[in-house]
Image (cartoon, coloured by chain):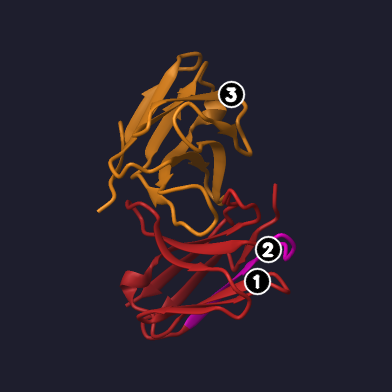
Chain colours: A red, B orange
Amino acid sequence: ILNVEQSPQSLHVQEGDSTNFTCSFPSSNFYALHWYRWETAKSPEALFVMTLNGDEKKKGRISATLNTKEGYSYLYIKGSQPEDSATYLCAPSHTNAGKSTFGDGTTLTVKP
Amino acid sequence: DVKVTQSSRYLVKRTGEKVFLECVQDMDHENMFWYRQDPGLGLRLIYFSYDVKMKEKGDIPEGYSVSREKKERFSLILESASTNQTSMYLCASRPRTGPYNEQFFGPGTRLTVL
């Protein structure tokens, strides 16, 4: 089982704050990394898929970067809003078949 | 929109019962997955299926089996439920095998084994 670490485990911020969290994974045999957002009482939904070293993806106020050489990805949220409250999961794949290992997630709570 | 449905949102069973969790997807996806999620832990893969009648063990298959007789349906079976199988179970599907395609998740089944 791959060692995938996400930090911090939880985060409480005020509305308007910008925040970021980390996903660390083994750098060898890397194929791709997915970020998912999981809101309470809903299903996890994909945010980004990242494949190349130096990749940067953006969706609205949320962006992500990827460093495959050192084995980490950052997720940034600019100007957090209460609707950003969710658990953010990263899932790197280290096989061509795409079997992913999920991190434990970072739970973000944005207070109005 | 891709839709992944699970047979129950909440389920309560007794120790020793045989439990079936059903998952159906409506987008002709090749791959399907079963995960469990426990507090403080991420999604842990129980079993996955690349295609009909094909299955492969995930990271925590003990105590579980699966069935995929039709492309759209993937069933998780707890042969003899135990209290340590109390958990949230999530089903997912993916268009095809490979690391670049996202997974689409169902709403989850929260199973309690008494």
The residue pinned by badge 2 equals A25
- Does the magenta segment cover residue A23? yes
Q: Earlier in the sequence, mark 2 or mark 1?
A: 2
Which mark identifies residue A72?
Answer: 1
Q: Amino acid at mark 3?
A: Gly
Q: Position of residue B45 (x, y in %)?
A: 56, 41
Q: Residue at x 66, y 58 (%)?
A: A4
Q: Which residues are magenta?
A: A19-29
Residues at discs 1 and 3 both on one chain: no
Q: Nearer the viewer, mark 3 or mark 2?
A: 2
Q: Position of residue B56 (x, y in %)?
A: 58, 33
Which residue is most to the left? B1
Packing grade of label 1 (10 A; few <14, some 14-19, many >=20) is many
Q: Amino acid at mark 1?
A: Tyr
Which mark identifies residue A96?
Answer: none
Residue B101 vs B77, above or below: the answer is below
> What separation in Å lies between label 1 and label 3 (alpha carbons)?
34 Å
Q: Are marks 2 and 1 in contact (CB under 8 Å)?
A: yes
Q: Are marks 3 and 2 in contact (CB under 8 Å)?
A: no
- Does the magenta segment cover residue B27? no
Label 2: state its secondary structure.
loop
Q: Position of residue B11 (x, y in %)?
A: 35, 28
Residue B53 vs A59, above or below: the answer is above
The residue pinned by badge 3 equals B63
